[in-house]
Structures are given as C-alpha cells and as structure tokens.
Image: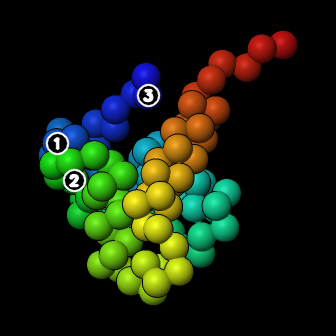
Amino acid sequence: MTRPSTIFHHAPARPILETDPELEAYNAAFEELELDWHWDSATMRELVGPGSEAERIAGWLRRHRPHLAKAYDVDALAREIVEARDRLRVGATSPHRH
C-alpha cells in the first residue's frame, strides 16, 4: 500500500514550498520520465482537491498539456507519474545501509 500524499488529499496545513519533498519527488519523476516540465508550489496548490492523485494529474495534463492527449493515454501517463514519484520519494527517504 502506498503512502497517501497529504498535499493532495486536502488543503495543506502548511504552505507548499519550492523545497517541499513531495514537489521535489514530482520534478524528479518528470526528469526520469523525460518530461520537459517542472512544477512549482503554485502547481501543487492547483492539484489539491477531491479524487485520486492520478485523476487530478490527468486533469492537469488535459488543461495544461492538451497536445499529450492526442498522442498518449493521459490517464496512464498520470499513473506513471505517480508511480515514479512514489519510487523516487521512497528511494530518497530510505535509510542507507553500509
């Protein structure tokens, strides 16, 4: 079971900063997936709301990257983004073993 994102499930109790680990994980996921965009705190605030993370990201893609809907299944792409973010977030917080 993946850890839910507190940023996406309800209005954040604290401001979303440019150095937020969640935001950094998304931007790392975009780089890994060779997507040429970068989210900022304003984008993260736009994504707060009801529904799953993948649903909200798919909606963002349809609004801000409509050309992708012509070539890709944006729902599948949104799920890939969430999976990459989870993998990178977990990897970034895993303890190092020596």
Q: Earlier in the sequence, mark 1 or mark 2?
A: 1
Looking at the picture, which amino acid does disc 3 mark? Thr
Q: Position of residue 38 (x, y in %)?
A: 50, 69
Looking at the picture, which amino acid does disc 2 mark? Val
* Observer-nearest of 35 and 24: 35
On screen, residue 9 versus residue 80, left or right, reads left
**Residue at the disc numbered 2:** 48
Contact? badges 1 and 2 (CB < 8 Å): yes
Which mark, by number, is residue 2? Answer: 3
How dense is the environment of label 1, judged by Cα within 10 Å: few (below 14), some, or many (20 and up)?
few
Q: Position of residue 64 (x, y in %)?
A: 35, 79
Residue 12 visible at all: no
Which corner quadrant of the image does residue 60 belong to? bottom left
Quarter occupied by the C terminus: top right
Contact? badges 1 and 3 (CB < 8 Å): no
Q: CA distance from mark 2 to mark 3?
A: 18 Å
**Dot in front, 1 or 3:** 3
Determine the residue positioned at 43% across, 67% down.
74
Q: Earlier in the sequence, mark 2 or mark 3?
A: 3
Determine the residue positioned at 28% across, 36% down.
6
* Residue 22 to residue 61: above or below: above
Quarter occupied by the N terminus: top left
Which corner quadrant of the image does residue 4 belong to? top left
How dense is the environment of label 2, judged by Cα within 10 Å: few (below 14), some, or many (20 and up)?
some
**Dot in front, 2 or 3:** 3
Q: CA distance from mark 1 to mark 2?
A: 6 Å
**Residue at the disc numbered 1:** 10
Which mark, by number, is residue 39? Answer: none
Q: CA distance from mark 1 to mark 3?
A: 17 Å
Determine the residue positioned at 22% across, 41% down.
9
